[in-house]
Amino acid sequence: MDDTTTEYYSRIRKHVYVTPRTFLSFLAFFEPLYNSNYEVLNTQSENFTIGLQKIAEASEEIARMGEALKKKEVVLKKAVDKTDKFVEQLKKESAKAEKKGREVAKTATECEA
């Protein structure tokens, strides 16, 4: 404040005195500025709080989904194992069927001859 009053004196050549009236005038000027800034900061604070709540909710939901995913992975692994066993069995049966088919074809050619 001293720097400002010194600069004011050097430019205008007038001293600055703070009287009760000027102080009240300053407060009257400051009050709307304070209220508007308070409203802005209050709104930002509320938005920030809401954002933190949303992040917390999302974290909980992600944790629940992770647990569900682990359970589904176990079921999926079992299904994959069953499928692999079925494919192996199918390959064996297919090989047997091809062998039988060749035997039938051989017998059919022998019968035709």
Image (cartoon, helix red, strand yellow):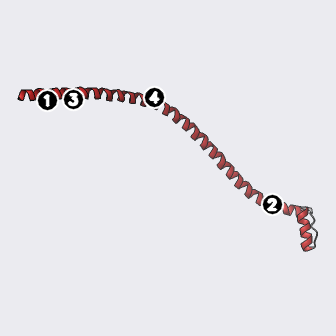
Precedes in sequence: disc 3 or disc 2 = 2
Q: CA distance from mark 3 to mark 2?
A: 96 Å
Crowd around label 2: few <14 · some 14–19 · many ≥20 (10 Å): few
Q: Position of residue 64 (x, y in %)?
A: 53, 34
Q: CA distance from mark 1 to mark 3?
A: 10 Å
Q: CA distance from mark 4 to mark 2?
A: 65 Å
Tell me which residue sits at (60%, 43%) in the image. 55
Q: Nearer the viewer, mark 1 or mark 4?
A: 1
Identity, as a three-letter code, of the amino acid under mark 4: Val
Circle 1 residue: 105
**Given contact means CB atoms under 8 Å apart, are the residues at marks 4 and 2 in contact?**
no
Precedes in sequence: disc 4 or disc 3 = 4
> On residue 98, which mark appears?
3
> On residue 79, which mark appears?
none
Q: Position of residue 29 (x, y in %)?
A: 81, 63
Identity, as a three-letter code, of the amino acid under mark 3: Glu
Precedes in sequence: disc 2 or disc 1 = 2
Q: Position of residue 42 (x, y in %)?
A: 70, 51
Which quarter of the rendered picture does the N terminus lie within? bottom right
Tell me which residue sits at (21%, 27%) in the image. 99
Precedes in sequence: disc 4 or disc 2 = 2
Q: Nearer the viewer, mark 3 or mark 2?
A: 3
Secondary structure of residue under mark 2: helix
Circle 2 residue: 30
